[in-house]
Amino acid sequence: MRSVKHKIPVINGRNFRDKYFYPVDTRTDTGKFEIHRREDEGYRCQPMITANRLDFYMVVLVTGGEGIKTFGTKQYYIRKGMLCFISPGMVTNWESVVDEHQGYIITFDAHILPRLHTYPFFQLDGCPVIQLNAEQQADFHHYFQEIEKEYKAGQLELIKAFLTVVFLKAQQLYTATEQGAGSNAAIRLTAAFTFLIDKDFEQKLATYAGLLNVTQNHLNDTVKAVTGKTPGTHIHERMVKEAAQLLVHTELTIAEICYRLNFSDQSYFIRFFKKYTGFTPGQYRSNTKGL
């Protein structure tokens, strides 16, 4: 009888690009080492990636975007501030919750560094996701930026040095606790809520709860438990995202954007926007127009 293992496709460096990302004209062959940004045109992940195994290692630093990732039998709600590790042979799948994703993807083969299998986050029974706080996010973002710089310069030995720093720092943060993991039902409910507000963020929380056939309290508790943020915060962040897009891509005045987003007080809208971005709407528009 054929093993079930062989029914799950194994993805190698040659077909990785086609299976994981939107089709583009560029080609890649994941060999000894690569690093790419998740927001780059050639590395925007597919909305759904069915169960597969890689024959190389992958590390992902998430700085934006959300989705559901299954590592073996463990399911996680992936979001900003997470560091994810995939080892060769691990069965994973992916389902995007939002359209836009940011961060870094690193891929490399087993020969780039010795004893990779001894790191707990690369072990099949380990915890493959580490939740970073704000300070840790800044530190790891710096490490990945340095790796990207040395990759462009072709400095493999320096890449190895920075990779070692990433793994040792991650090992210090590692615990056996299932960080970010939750029940499948909780993760699915959170994903459904995020999908709803991404398409229509102007409803009351009770409306979303009704559409999802749960109580408002249950929705609030579940979303906060899975993501660390209340549904109200998610809605506010979606409103800010919409306001930012209108500021950058339209000639609407701030008053018109305020009206379109159902703010009755323009001064309150300005304070609201600054709370989440650090800039007033006018400053944000001026800064982005200058790029």
Image (tube, rainbow, N blue to C red):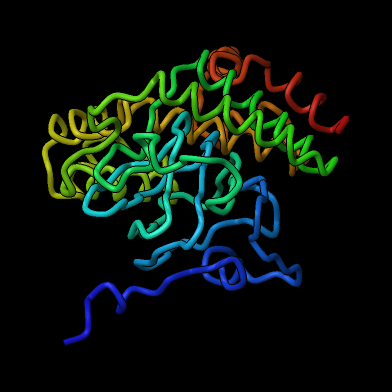
**In the picture provided, is 248 more to the left or to the right than 258?**
right
Q: x, y (%) of residue 245?
A: 65, 40
**Left or right: where does residue 129 sit relative to residue 285?**
left
Q: Residue at x 22, y 85 (%)?
A: 2
Residue nearer the viewer, 258 or 76: 76
Q: Nearer the viewer, residue 83 or 123?
A: 123
Q: Is residue 175 left or right of residue 185?
A: right
Instruction: Please say if 134 is above or below 225.
Output: above
Residue 162: x, y in percent?
65, 29
- Give the tally of numbered discs: 0
Task: Please tell me which residue is depicted at 44% across the width and 17% down the height of the picture.
Answer: 133
User: Percent position (x, y) of residue 52?
Assistant: 38, 67
230 or 49, which lies in front? 49
Residue 253: image location, x then y, percent: 73, 31
Residue 210 sits above or below residue 26 on the image: above
Q: Quadrant of the C terminus?
A: top right
| Residue drawn at x 13%, y 34% as measured from the top left | 218
Whether residue 96 is situated above or below residue 223 in the rendered picture:
below
